[in-house]
Amino acid sequence: WKQRVRFRMLDLGCGDGHVALQLLESAEQRGGSLDVLGVDVCDSAVTSAREMAQGRKIPEFGSVSEQTSISFLAHDVTELDIAPTHGLFDVVLCQLVISVVGGKEKRKALLACIFAH
């Protein structure tokens, strides 16, 4: 945080957004700013994440704000291709996802997604 003030993070397999929200809060406490886009295949988890973010009045990802921002998207992380519309991210978080993605080809697709973003 000392060398750079603002980071963009893609959280693949974000679940209910708990980890992303904790990291966002930690960044703010250290004087930084974190823009987070969380993606999960589970609609209900994404709905919960959105509700938590809205409850904290955090602006939407990509807004023209000086504040941190966060958004959540329901999508299969092995088929994600948002680099053309969202650009590249400084960090891609993929916590506890590789072990639950089925099959060798799906895992390869997940790793390709991480590197592409």
Image: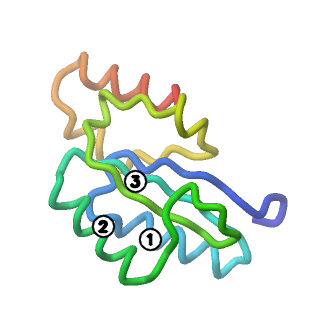
For discs 2 and 1, the disc positioned in front in the rendered view: 2
Q: Residue at x 41, y 27 (%)?
A: 111
Residue located at (29% from left, 43% from top): 97
Q: Is residue 61 left or right of residue 51?
A: right
Q: Residue at x 84, y 59 (%)?
A: 3
Kind of residue at disc 3: Gly
**Residue nearest the observer in this picture, 21 or 68:** 68
Q: Position of residue 42 (x, y in %)?
A: 18, 51
Q: Residues within 10 Å of mark 1 (few under 14, many from 20)?
A: many
SS label for mark 2: helix
Q: Are marks 2 and 3 in contact (CB under 8 Å)?
A: yes
Residue at the image position 51 percent from the left and 44 percent from the top: 92
Q: Position of residue 12 (x, y in %)?
A: 38, 45
Q: CA distance from mark 2 to mark 3?
A: 9 Å
Q: Disc 2 versus disc 1: distance between alpha carbons? A: 9 Å
Crowd class of label 2 (few under 14; some 14 to 19; many from 20; radius 10 Å):
many
Q: Which residue is mark 2?
A: 49
Q: Which mark is residue 21?
A: 1
**Contact? badges 3 and 1 (CB < 8 Å):** no
Residue 36 - label:
none
Q: Position of residue 61 (x, y in %)?
A: 52, 58
Residue positioned most to the right: 3
- Pointers 2 and 1 in contact (C-beta within 8 Å): yes
Q: According to the image, label 3 marks what residue?
A: 38
Residue 88 location in percent, x, y?
Answer: 60, 36
